[in-house]
Amino acid sequence: TNNGGSFGGIVYFDITVAHSVLITAFDMSYDPNNSPSGTAAGVQVYTTPTTYVGVEGSAAAWTQVASGSGSAAGVLNTPTNLPLSAPLLMPADNYGMALVATGGAGHDYTTGSAITTYQDNFLTLTVGAAYNTPFGSTSPFSPRLWNGAIYYTPANGLFSSFSATPTSGPSPLLVQFTDTTFTSDPGGVTSWAW
């Protein structure tokens, strides 16, 4: 890192998913002067179709897809691991991604001279831009190279996940269940046994 943003700031990058993955955590970099060891740190993960470019200032173009939390490492250039509250399924496609810092932390990043791409067999990450408030400007600081890591596993086989809202209340309780199950089987999920 050689630069940093305000508490609650945002970093943008593009991600191409070649083969579906389940993202389970992010590593983030925080300035120990602003976020000493043990400081509450978190991330809200947003995506938009195709690319972040051109929609940086439009909150309506983004969907929050995950969140995670942890405690700041408190050491310069030492990652803070933020496990997601639920794994994030990313099907093969192109996305713009935005990470909003939450808790008492602000992103550290590198002020780059060019857009930089990182790639493996599953993901291509092209970094990006940053700003001091979420979706606060159509002209964010760019280029800004996010200092972080994405923890993921290939999404083969079956991944079963349900969420419910509300999760408690007086009887009778009307609950909305959401099925976010993923299977790599071409036939899909055909039945459930409860």
Image: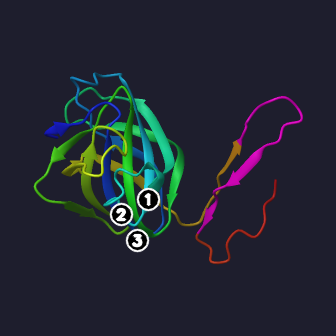
Mark 2–mark 1 distance (CA, rounded to whole Å): 7 Å
Report the residue marked by disc 2: 51
Tell whether position 64 is magenta: no
Which amino acid type corresponds to the residue marked 3 in the rendered image?
A: Ala
Which amino acid type corresponds to the residue marked 2 in the rendered image?
A: Thr
- On residue 18, which mark appears? 3
Residue lying at the far right of the rendered structure: 172
Quadrant location of the N terminus?
top left
Q: Secondary structure at mark 1?
A: strand
Location of residue 94 (image quadrant)? bottom left
What residue span does the magenta drawing correspond to?
A: 165-183
Q: Secondary structure at mark 2?
A: loop
Which amino acid type corresponds to the residue marked 1 in the rendered image?
A: Thr
Q: Is residue 185 left or right of residue 37?
A: right
Q: Is residue 31 above or below residue 165?
A: above
Q: Secondary structure at mark 3?
A: loop
Tell whether position 182 is magenta: yes
Q: Residue at x 19, y 52 (%)?
A: 142
Q: Is residue 67 left or right of residue 173?
A: left
Q: Residue at x 13, y 52 (%)?
A: 112
Report the residue marked by disc 1: 48
Which is more N-terminal, label 3 or label 2?
A: 3
Contact (CB < 8 A) between labels 2 and 1? yes
